[in-house]
Image (tube, grey):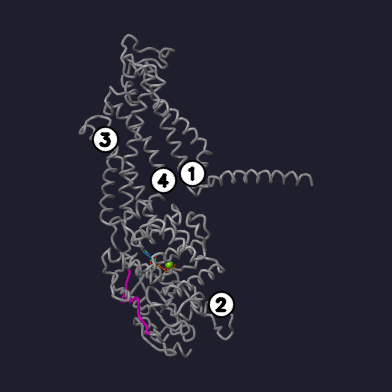
Amino acid sequence: MSESIETILTLKDMETHFPIKKGVFKRTTGYVKAVDGVSLEVYRGETLALVGESGCGKTTLGKSILQLVKPTSGKIIYNDKTTERDLCRLSQKEMMEVNQKLQIVFQDPQSSLNPAFTIFGSLQDSLKAHGIKSKSERRKIIGDLLEAVNMRREQMDLYPHEFSGGQRQRIGIARALSIEPDLIVCDEAVSALDVSIQAQVLKLLKDIKEERNLTYIFITHDLSVVEYISDRVAVMYLGKIVELAEVEDLYASTMHPYTKALLSAIPVADLDRRKKRILLEGDVPSPVNPPSGCPFHPRCSQCQDICKTVVPELKRFETNGNEHYSACHFAEEQLSQ
Amino acid sequence: MKDTEKKKTRLEKKFDKILIREDTGLIKNKKGSRAFRKLMSNRLAVAGIIIVSVILLASIFAPLICRYDPLKLDLRNKLQKPSMEHLIGTDQLGRDIFARIVYGGRVSILVGLGSALASAVVGVAIGAYTGYKGGLLDKIMLRLSELVMAFPQIILVLLLVTIMGQGLRNLIIIFTLTGWGGIYRMTRAQMLSLREEEYVQALRAFGLNNFSIAYKHMLPNAVGPIVVNITLSTAMFILYEAALSFLGLGVPLNIATWGNIVNIAQDLRYLQFFWWLWVPGAIVISLFVLGINFIGDGLRDSADPMQQG
Ligand SMILES: Nc1ncnc2c1ncn2[C@@H]1O[C@H](COP(=O)(O)OP(=O)(O)OP(=O)(O)O)[C@@H](O)[C@H]1O
Ligand SMILES: [Mg+2]
């Protein structure tokens, strides 16, 4: 990773809070802090994995980037090689241009395709909206896309219920590719598939990325997938990034107790790497009332007094010459353990 | 040994039957066919379809099956009992009651179906867009519909009739104004749940405009409940028309409608001694409404994917 690095997306203190409304008068009684102050840089051409337990705000972060959910505050700066634009402050028309470059593949292959239309029927409108006027051309593009995800052209005239889960997921990928984006958010793109099909789809995603020079933000809770596909990994906990590093560094020199616990939960065949399993006690605390201090402290085995009161910042360290961020008061101590 | 063989063949026969059915099903493997088959296997729904189509066809082809003009007075032959001459007799002005019921069906069904369709157009057009879009417009429409629905509908209708005056067109307009709330709320609820589907989010990620997402892509997935609602509210509006006409506030009395026919029962003398003036009309209204409700219920069941059939 020594070529000149260009950032494609910069998040600055991004927050997405959902109001909780109660009672007859729908008074706001609190907020679900789904994303709570995330700062992050995504480099052009990389695959950045975003991992964390269920409910920690991964999907919300992904949707906020595409403005499918309006972020409450913060900046999302998108660099399209010529200009830098803050996505939170774009008009609808400008957003439409950016939409051509940012796409998303969804988690659930059951609900990601419209049951009332054939594949061609549901994909063609987005092509039309992005300026492809002739029907034959749209058919050609969609046919090519299906072939790119290892399906047959003729299948564009079938309805979603005629496909298997893996096929639907590939159609979802084809749809995201249809207007030639730069960056794709893959939200648990393979989690709903069984293992053999997972491998196929992952390989497909990797090949397509090489072919089309894409950048991925790859959301998952499966750390074994991360190792295969990603360059860097961001670990999320309760709406915050707690650790961010190159994949090898994250595995070899973990700097956050939460990441350690996650890693120890993957079954490894390699004896050298086999570590003692650290059990995570208790549930993820509620994002409505996050714990004071470090959000992880109630479940942390190394919790000290300072952890209960002071919120640790995401600090920059270096491991093996690469930058490595950790939000733990005792990040360096983690290395020696 | 023999026993198992017998069982096997019976089982095989069953499989063969299923296979044949599947094969014939495969020829027309469209989405609707399954729902249609399910509807057809529902006896009540089939009965409903038969009743409704008989009455509907009779009304449409009224001139072919009626010997008399429903409006022609014949005072010398008034209050005739049912006979070969007049199948269900004549009324107090000597008009043929059979003809009046058959021709009356045209107007009553027109009012019922017309109002149901017009309410559906209004309710669906508003509900689909505001349900998807949310925001201020949605809040305003929701409150407005609550306002209309909280008011007892029949009183509202009476009020409007006195303001706007009687008449066929006014009646349809009034029924639509007072009746769009139900289907609006149902459509809106459908859209609220569809809105969270990922294919809708995907469309938004392409920057498609709201109209196209709401009306073109989402609405087709809400059609089932909407059709059910239209059938059921057709029945309701037919009853409304009858009730209003019974009160003398519906369609002007000189036009034959089912409501105007039973209107005669207000007069105690006719109610007691001349049953044929009003009983056949009442029966036809009940049959038609019942038939439509059977169809509506059948449609609802066949559209429900949770029920196997
Ligand atoms: N539209 C919404 N309104 C209110 N709360 C929401 C909404 N969407 C998400 N949340 C809440 O925000 C939190 C984060 O949800 P999110 O879907 O981002 O988690 P996730 O990390 O993607 O989880 P998973 O791995 O299960 O997909 C959850 O507590 C969830 O209940
Ligand atoms: Mg998710």
Name the residue located 78 percent from the left edge and 44 percent from the top edge: B2
Of the two numbered discs 4 and 3 on the same chain, state the one appearing first in sequence.
Answer: 3
Name the residue located 35 percent from the left edge and 32 percent from the top edge: B238
Tell me the CA gap for discs 3 and 2.
71 Å
Q: Which mark is residue B225?
A: 4
Question: Local crowd at mark 3 within 10 Å, few (<14), some, or many (≥20)?
Answer: many
Tell me the CA gap for discs 1 and 3.
34 Å
Q: Which residue is mark 1?
A: B302
Q: Chain of mark 2?
A: A
Of the two numbered discs 4 and 1 on the same chain, state the one appearing first in sequence.
Answer: 4
Identify residue type, mark 3.
Val
Image coordinates of residue B19 in percent, x first then y, are 62, 46
Image coordinates of residue A305 in percent, x first then y, are 38, 84
Start-end of magenta stretch: A4-16
The secondary structure that most of the magenta stretch takes on is strand
Tell me the CA gap for discs 4 and 1.
11 Å
Q: Which residue is mark 2?
A: A267
Describe residue B309's horizontal placement relative to residue A217 as left or right: right
Q: Which residue is mark 3?
A: B157
